[in-house]
Image (cartoon, helix red, strand yellow):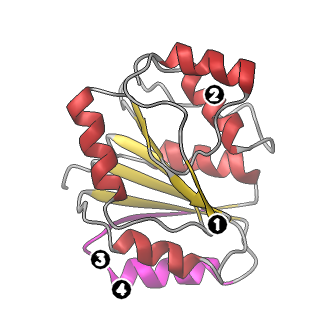
Amino acid sequence: MKTIKVSVCISVHNTAHLLPRCLDSLLKQTMKDLEIVLVNNGSSDNSEDIMRQYSNHYPQIQWQIIVQEDRGLAQGRQTGINHAIGEYIAFLDADDYVDSHMYSKLYDVAIENSADIVECEVFRDGSILSSPYTGLYDANFIFRDYLLYNSLHSFIGIIFKFLHSNSNVAGILEPYKYICTSGFIAFNIFKAFNPI
């Protein structure tokens, strides 16, 4: 089995009409050491069929498909974390799509800077969302900013370090069954890390 650099976790709930565009953008990634972890979170549409069609049609990609009852977005993402084998983890929603170089660039920056978390700009609703942070920061500083100013705008353009044996993120969302926003997840993940 090849070494996986980034696991992209997608919690899917009745988004069959959007899922192909998302998966197509992942198939175009320049990073080839990528894993796609799909969590069918209680879909009643043909989302699972689409997942299986893609995994069968593109066997050169590392796929994991997990089927569970609808446990909410937070638990869908936690299931993805629990199954991911990549050195870094990224979340993507089924209605998102990414630039073909995104994960390669994020990973390279993370390795070059020994960073646990790396983020990039995100295009949403006709505008570019940029992080207020440029350079290296201690996670406690960003965590404090988040608490004081709610300054985390997005969670899509982020990868974070995943250490299998002593994971910073194992169980991070377990207590939260149906509470989930990008900022909420970021809040819990930033609490678990040091340098960014």
Marks 3, 2: nearer the viewer = 2
- Within 10 Å of disc 1 (Cα), the crowding (few <14, some 14-19, many 20+) is few
Indicate which label's residue lies in the foreground, 3 or 1: 1
189 vs 87, left or right, is right
Identify the residue at image location x=23%, y=35%.
111
Q: Is residue 155 magenta?
A: no
Give whichever of discs 1 and 4 has the lower sequence position: 4
Residue position marked by numbered label 1 in the rendering: 126
Distance from disc 3 to disc 1, alpha carbons, whole Å, reads 35 Å
Name which of mark 3 and mark 1 comes first in the sequence.
Answer: 3
Q: Which stretch is magenta?
A: 46-67
Q: Is residue 55 visible?
A: yes
At a point 80% along the width and 41% down the height, the residue shown is 179
Q: Which residue is mark 2?
A: 188
Q: CA distance from mark 1 to mark 4?
A: 33 Å
Nearer to us of marks 2 and 4 is 2
Residue depth check, mark 1 versus mark 2: number of the one nearer the observer: 1
Instruction: Look at label 4 and name its amino acid.
Output: His
Q: Which residue is mark 3?
A: 59
Q: Amino acid at mark 1?
A: Gly
Side of 188 where 107 appears, left or right: left
Assign a secondary structure to mark 3: loop
Amino acid under disc 2: Asn
Callout 1: SS: loop
Labels 3 & 4 near each other (Cβ < 8 A): yes
